[in-house]
Image (cartoon, rainbow, N blue to C red):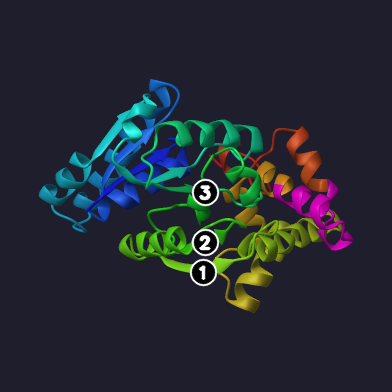
Amino acid sequence: MSKVAVIGSGLMGGGIAQACAVAGYEVVNLDIAQEPLDRAQALVAKLMNKKVAKGKMTQEECDEVLGLMRYSTDYADLAGARFVIEAVPERLDFKESTFAKMDEFADEDAVLLTNTSGIDIDAIAAATKRPESVLGMHFFYPAPVMKLVELIRGAATSDEAFAAAKELADQIGKTSVTAPNQPGFIVNRIIVPYQNEGAFLVSEGCTPEDVDNGMKLGCNHPMGPCELMDFTGIDVVYATMKGLYESFGDEKYRPCPLLKEMIDAGHLGRKTGRGFYTYE
């Protein structure tokens, strides 16, 4: 199979790289420094070896997948990649500078994909001289496990680039949905206001446990909104909600003030040990 380059080696970028290697693609994972790459490589190896320990794959299969993965700080390693997937932090300036580098170093026929969860695709594509090759491919965390990707066309995205991205999604075992180039796309436009409403209920006196049990037992959701916010990160939920509010100007997207209070207190969820719940 062809080569995939993933730029960004955080939890999303590393997970996307893993998912592509498991599907048989040759993968290079790029970042601006060696330290995050070392962490990503160690985490992928740990996760893959857990699969071996649980009997979900053989050691040979594990070694084959890990052998398909390389880690680099050199953009010249984009050469030969049919797909280049950007997974840097969710800031337009970061994405613009990354896509300018992709435009410089990626092959002429490469499809340039952004893992943005809500930034305008046209704004990102404008950083390149080939906006027809750019579209959104939004993965969900954890990328090796979650089955969905959202595909988002920009105004200039070609049919060929879109079809190639859809084929990539199919090859790595994902179901793709076509989302509008609007803030939040499909999933975040629905799920983040749902989480925000859970925060309002807590601020009005409900316990997080009652809110979560209500949705888990009453709607058969695997996680309640407070658990989900802790898992995602309170700061991430707040930023997405704020973006929806500023973009649409609709009061239904107004972020719950409790979320900002939690951020100011450093209670961001699982990653800090405390959010709506406390974690060891």
Q: Residue at x 61, y 51 (%)?
A: 121
Q: Residue at x 15, y 46 (%)?
A: 64
Within-10-Å neighbours for mark 3: few <14, some 14–19, many 20+ = many
Q: CA distance from mark 1 to mark 2?
A: 6 Å
Judging depth in this view, the residue of 204 and 3 nearest the camera is: 3
Nearest to N terminus: mark 2 or mark 3: 3
* Corner quadrant of residue 161: bottom left
Judging depth in this view, the residue of 213 and 118 nearest the camera is: 118
Q: Residue 165, percent across and down?
A: 42, 59
Q: Residue at x 80, y 53 (%)?
A: 247
Q: Which residue is mark 2?
A: 151
Q: CA distance from mark 3 to mark 1?
A: 14 Å
Q: Amino acid at mark 1?
A: Val
| Chain part drawn in magenta | 240-257
Q: Which residue is mark 3?
A: 115
Q: Residue at x 23, y 44 (%)?
A: 49
